[in-house]
Image: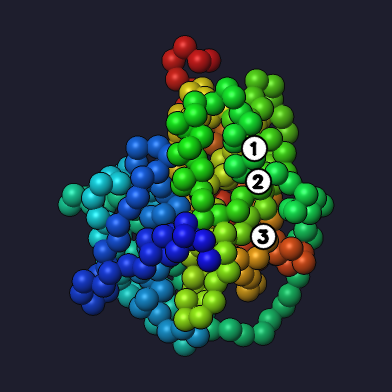
Amino acid sequence: MSQALQSLLDLLDLEQIEQDIFRGRSRSAVVPRVFGGQVAAQALVAAGRTVPDDRPAHSLHAYFLRPGDPEAPIVYTVDRIRDGRSFTTRRVVAVQHGHPIFHLSASFQTAEEGLDHQYPMPPAPDPATLPTSEDRLRGYTHLDPEVVERFLETRAAVDLRHVEEPPYGDFGDPRDPHSQVWFRTNGKLDGDIDTPLLHVVLATYVSDMTLLDSVLLAHGRGGWAVGDVVGASLDHAMWFHRPFRADEWLLYDQQSPSAHGGRGLGQARIYTQDGRLAITVMQEGVVRVPRGRD
């Protein structure tokens, strides 16, 4: 296991300060606020700590309410909304400085048999043939070197490989609002930490990294990294369909069906390398063009 992955696991290991109340810390992000994927992942950890291990998470729905302060701890309060025979529901509120910054509802279900079908996996190149994030980023001479280093630092726990150039690497001309990324953790997960909840939590963490990139591609924008767009996540939803491992390659197939009114919508499917549909993701975010960059 890489040191970066161990640091991420430590970040996701919340401190329990009272029954159904947990405290998490933050670390520096690429932008001067708490990374949304971190808050969502920590909130899911808090919810999962109050649910039996034999009920894995099957969905989450969340709203980002305020920017998080990376210099302050985050307190997560869990409400035990329902404990049914098959389903368990939890609501989590993340609080900083006396104000809620994030709200999550998560549902957990006992395993059972049922109908089974899936949307087929789209074609994608073998991840081993693609350049790493470090290889790509260090080749972008138009980016501020400090931005590149912050990117690499915050994503060091994840081996993330774009199939095509990301928006900040090739911008100016509109492209199809579709992107693909392979990802896995930078190291294997085993021992006591190797639980279904951890794999779901790690996928939640990564899911907020690139989903709105397809919005930028449709307009030839490079995003905050080149200063032609400012934005932030508004809401986030995930459905976990089939078991998967976050330390094995997952294909994140993303697209944007719409952008309007200062908001952009991203939707995606995440597949295992052998073609099983593991997760569906939806996210809307603020996407604004600064004055003078129209």
Q: Are marks 2 and 1 in contact (CB under 8 Å)?
A: yes
In 3D space, how far apart are the residues under numbered discs 2 and 1 (Cα atoms)? 6 Å
The residue shown at (73%, 75%) is 116
In the picture shown, does residue 149 fall above or below 126?
above
Judging depth in this view, the residue of 219 and 191 nearest the camera is: 191
In which quarter of the view is residue 281 placed?
Answer: bottom right
Judging depth in this view, the residue of 45 and 187 nearest the camera is: 187
* Disc 3 residue crowd, few under 14, some 14–19, many 20+, Cα 10 Å: many
The residue shown at (47%, 12%) is 292
The residue shown at (49%, 70%) is 198
Residue 25, given in percent of the width and then of the height, sits at 30, 57
In the picture shown, does residue 68 fall above or below 10?
above
The residue shown at (37%, 61%) is 11
- The dot on residue 132 is 2
Q: Are marks 1 and 3 in contact (CB under 8 Å)?
A: no
* Local secondary structure at mark 1: helix
Three-letter residue code for mark 2: Thr
In 3D space, how far apart are the residues under numbered discs 2 and 3 (Cα atoms)? 15 Å
* Local secondary structure at mark 2: loop
Three-letter residue code for mark 3: Leu
Judging depth in this view, the residue of 135 and 198 nearest the camera is: 135
225 lies left or right of 126: left
Q: Which residue is mark 1?
A: 136
Q: Which residue is mark 3?
A: 250
Judging depth in this view, the residue of 212 and 209 nearest the camera is: 209
